Image (spheres, rainbow, N blue to C red):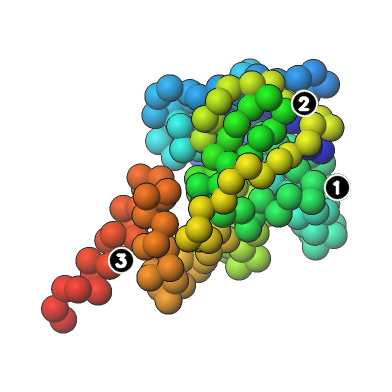
């Protein structure tokens, strides 16, 4: 674990319709507790802030992890000095490849048990935070989005903690493949994603079902 990060509230025109956001995460020098939000809103990270609960937070997006290697890539590509938390992530991980984690995989992080749920879908607030109007496009094209997690067992997480993969579903569907389907139009992945239906969170499962339904309708 490279860093555990919590939100600093930001305001400004770039924050969109809500007028404020918790996307700006800063490293914590102390262990942070993770817990199931136990609702369809809120963060699974104690002390964090979720403003737009229509699109963020809740059980299936309780915790967000992003690889420090990808932060370094964007720093080089954009000429920015991006630090842990600057992708809006709660957990900055090293050597874990969160963008290719298998959906339904269980990770032990500190004393918490997390379950991989879905890719991050970049939004206009993220683009505003980085002051890059085309960020949604280029971030989506790059395709390494990081991963959302549900909290299956609460616990404390701190910088330097080990990340251990405890179990991996046999279907092998990764968050990267899920994003390629929803964010890059890869309809050829539909059959593969359907093998993971029992592990897909609600919105992703609905999109897979809708895609299959559209194929079966007569033209």
Q: In the displayed image of the protein, which residue is found farthest to the left? A: 218
Task: Residue under label 1, please give it.
Answer: 81
Secondary structure state at the residue bearing disc 2: loop
Earlier sequence position, callout 1 versus callout 2: 1
Q: Do residues under tags 3 and 2 come within 8 Å of each other at their CB atoms?
A: no
User: Residue at horizontal 53%, vertical 61%?
Assistant: 172
Task: Residue under label 3, please give it.
Answer: 211
Q: In the displayed image of the protein, which residue is found farthest to the bottom? A: 219
Badge 3 crowding class, 10 Å Cα cut-off, few under 14, some 14 to 19, many 20 or more, is few
- Between circles 1 and 2, the one closer to the viewer is 2
Q: Tag on residue 208?
A: none
* Mark 3–mark 2 distance (CA, rounded to whole Å): 40 Å
* Mark 3–mark 1 distance (CA, rounded to whole Å): 40 Å
Q: Position of residue 109 (x, y in %)?
A: 69, 33
- Is 109 situated left or right of 83 in this image? left
- Is 71 situated left or right of 65 in this image? right
The C terminus lies in quadrant: bottom left
Secondary structure state at the residue bearing disc 1: loop
Task: Residue under label 2, please give it.
Answer: 158
Q: Do residues under tags 3 and 1 come within 8 Å of each other at their CB atoms?
A: no
């Amino acid at each position: 674990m490279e860093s555990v990060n919590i939100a600093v509230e930001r305001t400004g025109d770039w924050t969109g319709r809500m007028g404020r956001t918790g996307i700006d995460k800063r490293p914590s020098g102390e262990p942070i507790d993770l817990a199931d939000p136990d609702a369809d809103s809120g963060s699974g990270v104690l002390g964090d802030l979720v403003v737009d609960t229509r699109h963020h937070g809740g059980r299936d997006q309780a915790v967000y992890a992003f690889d420090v290697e990808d932060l370094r890539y964007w720093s080089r590509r954009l000429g920015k000095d991006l630090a842990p938390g600057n992708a809006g992530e709660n957990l900055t991980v090293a050597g874990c490849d969160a963008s290719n984690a298998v959906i339904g995989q269980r990770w032990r992080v500190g004393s918490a048990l997390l379950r991989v749920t879905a890719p991050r879908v970049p939004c206009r607030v993220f683009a505003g935070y980085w002051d890059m109007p085309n960020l949604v496009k280029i971030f989506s094209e790059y395709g390494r989005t990081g991963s959302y997690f549900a909290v299956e067992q609460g616990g404390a997480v701190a910088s330097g903690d080990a990340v251990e993969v405890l179990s991996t579903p046999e279907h092998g569907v990764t968050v990267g493949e899920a994003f390629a389907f929803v964010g890059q139009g890869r309809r050829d992945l539909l059959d593969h994603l359907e093998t993971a239906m029992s592990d897909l969170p609600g919105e992703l499962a609905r999109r897979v079902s809708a895609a299959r339904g559209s194929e079966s309708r007569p033209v």
